[in-house]
Image: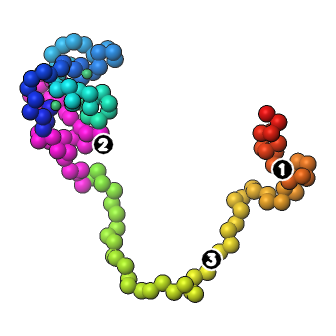
Amino acid sequence: MPGCDRSLWLQVHHIVHWEDGGPTDSHNLICICSKHHRLHHDGGLGITGNADAPGGLTFTNRHGLVLDPAGQPSAPRPGDMPRVAPYDGPTGERLHKHLIHYAKTQPPPGHDPDGASGSGGDGASPDRERTSAA
Ligand SMILES: [Zn+2]
Ligand SMILES: [Zn+2]
């Protein structure tokens, strides 16, 4: 386990979990400390790969970033990050309240504020009638 120096009281973990059909073979078994074992089963540590192959295991944090040998998440590769235009910063202009005009809010399309179309004419929406009847 990268970044973990525990070498005593280790627990044997099935990389492909035993309850998911993972075999009890050396390529599927790893010895980890109880803290990291619990972290893995709580979803905070990803462990995948072949334990028999040198360097065959991949450890990831809860965000899916691969951990380096010191246990630190590796920096995302350039292709992993969305391209964002550089921010030019504020212009330094003042905001003048008297130049701001607020548009009147429009009801969402399909909404009938008067209740003129539809049921009854008492103003209650069909949904409300159904709720009170239940
Ligand atoms: Zn386990
Ligand atoms: Zn550990």
Q: Which residue is mark 3?
A: 102
Principal secondary structure, stretch drawn in magenta: loop
Element assignment for label 3:
loop
Q: CA distance from mark 2 to mark 3?
A: 41 Å
* Magenta stretch holds residue 61: yes
Give the mark, 2 or 3, whose residue is nearer the N terminus: 2
- Would residue 134 be found to the left or right of residue 64 on screen? right
Proximity of marks 1 and 3: CB atoms separated by less than 8 Å? no
Q: CA distance from mark 2 to mark 1?
A: 48 Å
Can you tell me which quadrant of the image ligand 1 is in?
top left
Q: Which residue is mark 2?
A: 63
Q: Position of residue 46 (x, y in %)?
A: 26, 33
Q: CA distance from mark 1 to mark 3?
A: 30 Å
* Viewer-proximal residue among 51 and 96: 96
Which residues are the magenta region? 50-78
Residue at screen point 34% across, 76% down: 89
Q: Which residue is mark 1?
A: 124
Q: Does 96 appear above or below 52? A: below
Element assignment for label 1:
loop
